[in-house]
Image: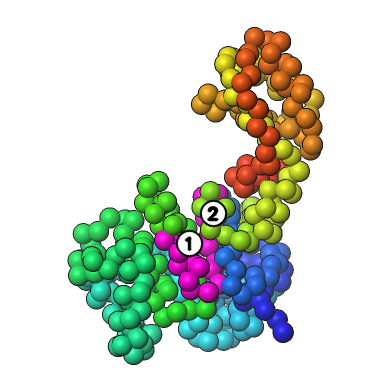
Amino acid sequence: MNNNTIECKQLGKNFGALRALQNVSMQIPAGSVFGLLGPNGSGKTTTIRLMLGLLQPDAGSVSVFGLDPISQGDAVREQCGALLEHTGLYERLSAEDNLNFYGQIWHMPQRELQARMQELLGKLDLWDRRKELVGNWSRGMKQKLAVARAMLHQPKLVFLDEPTAGLDPVAAAALNNDLLKLVKDEQATIFLTTHNLSEAEKVCNLVGVLRKGQLIAFGGPHTLTQSTGNAVVDIFGQNLTASAILEKLRGLPHVQQVEAVDDHLVIELEGKTEPAEVIKTLVMNGAAVDEVRRRQADLEESFLKLMEEENA
């Protein structure tokens, strides 16, 4: 039995001469938390709109729950929740009235609706604020309520299009923590778009990378970080960041990148290259090395590497 919630085969979409999406193929198993990563304009929102049947593809196909989003759009959308560019909230209504309104749209029985509201608002730390007008809330609180709106009717698939965009770091971290709690409890498939790589690494168990409408990487976050094949070395000490030293390090064979970050160096080494030559160069040029930490590149570093390769 096919366990994929979403399947795309050679999916393509054009807007006039602009090829917004090209030959995108992917399978997203039920229960996954999938993150579609990419810079602004890479085709992330277009992908969601195709999956919801809001746009018609110009090439290839997409199925959601085994259904065609164009010819069977109502059957697809009734099983989905979505937070796209706008929150969909009425700012002159209270949080409670907003959810009551959407619950009625979904034909939820009143007792079920009240229980679901209490459950979601409780998990999002909004229950005690439910009587307040949404227009008086911060952007972070509105985004939390919009997530509750998208999940109100217990959909099998939830689309969240850059849910932390425009939030300050504290509000974004709070929303991510709440999303983690909800994801564990809901057992729904989550389709998240973002260009916040730390967000994706924390929340997602499956990621894809879009670049100019093309899917250039797909797999688990760990698989993606290994795909670049390079190790990263963090070096701590004194006198590490003089421009002459950085220039010498960048000239070493097998050194891919050198970056001074605060009080230490972050050096990307080709393949399994050992950092001995790097340390020797530092010491010979007057630096004192206190600590060396070797690690695999994180998701953000791997993402940037993929972007560089595509630009090369």
In the image, is residue 114 above or below residue 270?
below
Asked whether, in this view, residue 80 is left or right of residue 107, the answer is right
Residue 233: image location, x then y, percent: 67, 32
Q: Residue at (72%, 48%) from the top-left corner?
A: 226
Label 2 vs 1, first from the N-terminus = 1
In the image, is residue 191 above or below residue 234?
below
Q: Tag 1, which secondary structure?
A: helix
Query: Residue beneath label 1, please?
Result: 180
Residue 129: image location, x then y, percent: 23, 65
Q: Give the range drawn in magenta.
A: 178-197
Query: Residue beneath label 2, please?
Result: 202
Disc 2 marks a residue whose amino acid type is: Lys
Is residue 187 part of the magenta span, yes or no? yes
Q: Tag 2, which secondary structure?
A: helix
Confirm whether residue 216 shows in the render: no
Mark number displayed over residue 268: none
Residue 85: image location, x then y, percent: 42, 62
Assess disc 2: are there few (<14), some (14-19) or many (≥20) residues with their C-alpha within 10 Å of its C-alpha.
few
Q: Residue at (70%, 81%) from the top-left corner?
A: 2
Quarter of the image for residue 61 reads bottom right
Nearer to me, 57 or 218:
218
Q: Residue at (72%, 38%) from the top-left corner?
A: 231
